[in-house]
Amino acid sequence: MITNHKFFRYKLPNLSKFCQMKLNCWLFRFLPFWVSRWYLAILGRLYYFINQPERRLIRRTITHIWGPKLKAPELKVMVSRAFQGIFDHYHEKLVVAYSRLPGLKRFLRSRIRAVGEEILQEALAVGKGVLLVTGHFGAVELLPGFLGVQGYQVSMICRFKTGHLRNSLLSRAAAANVNLIDAEGENTLLAAIRALKQGQILITECDEFDEWRVSQHREIRFLGSPLAYDRTLDILCKRSGSPVVTGFMKRNGSQKYSLDFTAITNGRETGNSAIGERCLKVLEEAIQAAPEQWYQWKKFGTMIKIAEKETAYDHQESGYLAPQFGF
């Protein structure tokens, strides 16, 4: 196995830390968008060439879900595009964290189109803040900054992979009207409710599987797999009384994006329940339409124990993601 080779005597960091090497952070201050995207894709392919177990887990998870529906060539293309979507995510993360701030603000204002923004504005008019639920989908890294430069008061709970990233994002977020809540530094539930009480938009992700507060008595299905139900959004909604809206930032190509809003609750109902399930349904529809834009395949595969399953549709073991340097 490549990761056990004698030249790799240190533990391979996760992809996020691998991409955030100091040289890369410095380069992203100067490189044009298309050059930095190409460069990050090369780094990502190198990482998965080294980290074969993680590469196989992602491929097998995608194959488990989509194999029954697709022919072998179509499945191969989907797997390749899913990895490119992962690379695009980390590229966008570094652009937000390290590119020059004036240029980043111009990018956010000019490249993103909001669809159904009146849904968000109507929810804010209730006066209880808005619980804006998104996921590990598309260009989610651009979401807080886009809302911030549009003049919205935004808070988001974050878990930073590196101290350098934390310091960079905290200072930049303040300049873009965004309050980042460090999940390692305070009681996140209290901080989230406080932000909502102040009338802010609180951004959270419904597919952060390893942070779920699961119910032992309820089960849902997501992408065809049974999962224990996560109560986190139900708890937040009940304690804050805030309306719930989903927002997913889709990549449309040519450095253009669309942010699609969907109303889940209006904040006036009593006995709100199954908020998490309803949000996951919207996310699932987005994934069905553009599976290559979701990048939680690794965590989802771990959660459903994909390594213990027989993947009947593993059409082609070799060549699924042979390193391709360039597009």
Image (cartoon, grey):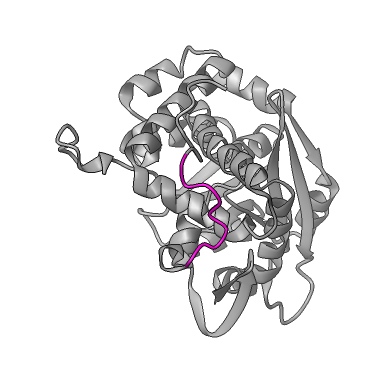
| Residue 129 appears in view | no
Q: Spot the residue most to the bottom.
A: 217
Instruction: Give the residue displayed 49% in from the left and 26% down from the top.
Output: 324
Q: How many marks?
A: 0
Image side of residue 140 versus residue 61, left or right: right
44 magenta-colored: no
314 magenta-colored: yes
Q: Position of residue 103 (x, y in %)?
A: 60, 17
Please, what is the dominant secondary structure of the magenta stretch?
Answer: loop
118 over 300 or under it: above or below: above
137 over 126 or under it: above or below: above
Instruction: Give the residue displayed 59% in from the left and 22% down from the top.
Output: 104
Instruction: Give the residue displayed 64% in from the left and 42% down from the top.
Output: 73
Q: Position of residue 114 (x, y in %)?
A: 78, 39
Image side of residue 18 versus residue 157, left or right: left
Q: Position of residue 304 (x, y in %)?
A: 48, 67
Quadrant location of the C terminus?
A: top right
Quadrant location of the N terminus?
A: top left
Residue 226 lies in what quarter of the image?
Answer: bottom right
Q: Position of residue 270 (x, y in %)?
A: 75, 80
Front-most of 284 and 61?
Answer: 61
| Residue 34 appears in view | yes
268 over 105 or under it: above or below: below
Front-most of 217 and 100?
Answer: 217
Front-most of 115 and 326?
Answer: 326
Q: Range of the magenta residues?
A: 310-318
